[in-house]
Image (cartoon, helix red, strand yellow):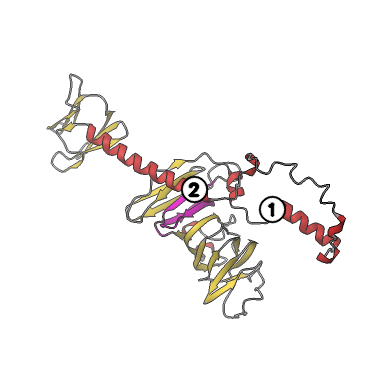
Amino acid sequence: MLLPQFALSKTIKEQPSVVSIGGISELNGSAQIVRDEPLDAELEFAIQSNDEAITKNGRMAIKFLDDSTVRLTEHSQLTIDEYIYDPDPSKSKMALTFGLGTARFVTGNLGRIDKQNIILKTPTANIAIRGTDFTATVDELGRSLIILLPDALGLSSGEIEVVTAMGVVTLNKPYQATTVSVFESAPSKPVILDLTLELIDNMLIVTPAKEDVLVQEELTTKKASILDFNGLDIDYLAEDFLANDELEFTELDINYLDVNFLEDLLNVLDALAISQDEDALAQATSTQITGTLLGKDSDTQITALITGNVISLRRQVNESVRLDVNGSESYTVIFIQDGVSNIIKINGGSNSTITITQGG
């Protein structure tokens, strides 16, 4: 077992029997670590299994021993259910529960934990991590938005499986996203968002703004104190504080640190998924198929599926056949397999007849 890389915070009483699994690597604003009782977070705060990280009006990054990093925005909740770090990646394990807010997860790039041993849970989905970089947003209703991010070359950083009680969706393309409303429903059909990694970075930045850093460096260099300030040195009458129109709104006024737009995006994608389901239902009900049932027909042993504007007919007994046709057209389809005939009419049938014969 490797030794911890982070010093214990002064606010924590050292417990020799408990091993640190990482520490707070970045902090901006107020946050807490709940361990039996709430403890104020600070840089290099030692993190342990079963800790709960809660941000209030602040942001925080936690870096684990395998170099995995989780960045939390304001009003986020993350529980570290289990973390086992072993020199053998197959014996290492990470299990996290993300309950609220927005976070970016960057798994260790040195293969120190096998990807199949990393699991993230939200109130509405389980996420099997096969990728290295993604974001998760969970709103007050528990709805989840998962976005797979690209690697440094702009390619897919891996693969993520979003699992619910009703289905699985795989994300394997940059900026591909899915939403889940409740665990008892299937994840929405993946869509590719028009985002950039720079925008994501700006939204999830934790470290203080550059201006703050420069001010801190200047104060450190000069070793200045509040007593060194002489308000009489400033001619307030000569200073025109209205020279810049502060009421004018420009692109520079856009706050890219505001991650509420991800929750808005969750609403949009959720509505889009509902619309797609309604469109599919309307398409299915407007298309007429006779001679077999929609879905799997146990009598004809034909499976009829409608995907968008495509009707797919499949039958597999001793022989296998599949036929895809345009759902807006009319057809008469005849399957003859081993002497068994099935006649299917699509949209009333027509003079266009497709006959497929197999076997004797």
Q: Which mark is residue 228?
A: none
Q: Quadrant of the C terminus?
A: top left
Q: Amino acid at mark 1?
A: Ala
Q: Quadrant of residue 283?
A: top left
The answer to whether residue 34 is above or below residue 140 is below
SS state under label 2: strand
Q: Position of residue 55 (x, y in %)?
A: 56, 63
Of all residues, the one furthest to the right in this rendering is: 233
Front residue of 248 and 339: 248
Q: Which residue is mark 2?
A: 147
Q: Which residue is mark 1?
A: 209
Count of marks, rendered view:
2
The answer to whether residue 47 is above or below residue 244 is below
| 150 magenta-colored | no
| 133 magenta-colored | yes
Q: Residue at x 75, y 41 (%)?
A: 243
Residue 121 visible somewhere in the drawing: yes
Front residue of 190 and 35: 35
Instruction: Name the mark nearer the viewer: 1 or 2.
Output: 1
Front residue of 353 and 268: 268
Q: Quadrant of residue 244?
A: top right
SS state under label 1: loop
Residues drawn in magenta: 123-149
